[in-house]
Amino acid sequence: MDCAVIPLNRHKDYLLVQTVDFFYPMVNDPELLGRIAIANVLSDVFAVGVTDFDSVEIIVSTSTSFTKKEQDVVISLIIAGFQNSLQANGYHKTPLVIRQLKINPWCIVGGIATSVCRSGEIILPSNAQPGDVLVLTKPLGGQMAMDAHLWQLNQNEKYTTLLSEFSDDDIRETFQIAVKSMTYLNKNAALLMHKYQAHCATDITGFGLLGHAQNLAQFQKQKVLFKIDQLPIIKNVHKLSLLMGQSTKLRSGRSVETSGGLLISLSPDAVDKFCRDFEEVTNGEQKSFKIGHVVASSESDAVLSDEVEFIEVSL
């Protein structure tokens, strides 16, 4: 699943929760890249309801094509992004360690998040019940939004195609919505999972919504089907993907996400309260979406509804 949960032999009341994650850059701003990276790394641990960390370690490599000065500046700004995000989200005392600094043909950024906690702090991802409602805490389409912005910066042929239906302001707005979503930590969603006794969760990243939903469904104690009825998508991204001939994965729920939201299975009597509290705790700046439901099944799986609805999201 999203992270390792390991009993500690010498301290039987405690468990080690740990994840390692990294990716290639999708933005040119190193500080912003750092903030996206730490949100992506911590999300694996938030997915099991854990919100306190004993250490966060940085893994970063900078390109061999950079000068020494450029390498120093890029690494310093990436580290600043990690630090800024931790401080802004109440993790002032969490140790931040530089685990690895490498020189590589391609930049890589990520990290290791570690927490030692009691079993009561963990929500194991295995207790979905028929009748549950599926909630997603971030919209989809971040990767396409980032790509469109890079095409805009590079002024290439794809950018020219975009201009046939979108203005520069449209592209920038879509990018800013994606940035706001991708830098937002899933911490509040994890806290509310405890308040409303979530049955299971996973975070949405490289396998896309449907891929991660299938993994989660197959991990359940009961045989269940996760049926997804709605796909919330960042403003303009659906139309962008159709224009560029790159809509297949997005429309099928398989678009690759970086620092995506949590997919959470909640009882029907808790779901509206969860969504209300989530919007309140984020001061209306983030939204959660009821995207499907759980039904009993002979085989555990996740599927899109035949008439899935695409919802455009402006944050």
Image (tube, rainbow, N blue to C red):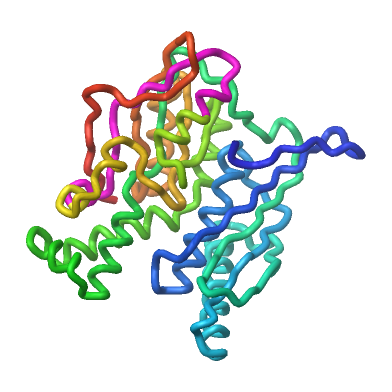
Q: Within the image, what quadrant is residue 14 found in? A: top right
- The foreground one among 169 and 120 is 169
What residue range appears in magenta?
216-239
On the picture, is 50 further left or further right than 164? right
Residue name at image x 58 percent, y 72 percent: 61
Residue name at image x 34 percent, y 53 percent: 142
Decide: is 280 above or below 29. above
Residue name at image x 26 percent, y 75 percent: 154
In the image as oriented, which residue stretches furthest toward the front? 105
Q: Residue 112 at what x, y percent from top left? A: 66, 56
Q: Residue 197 at what x, y percent from top left? A: 56, 25
Is residue 223 within the magenta segment?
Answer: yes
On the picture, is 283 further left or further right than 195? left
Decide: is 123 above or below 38. above
Quadrant including the N terminus: top right
Q: Residue 53 at what x, y percent from top left? A: 68, 51
Residue name at image x 55 percent, y 65 percent: 109
- The foreground one among 82 and 255 is 255
Q: Residue 310 at what x, y percent from top left? A: 22, 36
Decide: is 306 above or below 185. above
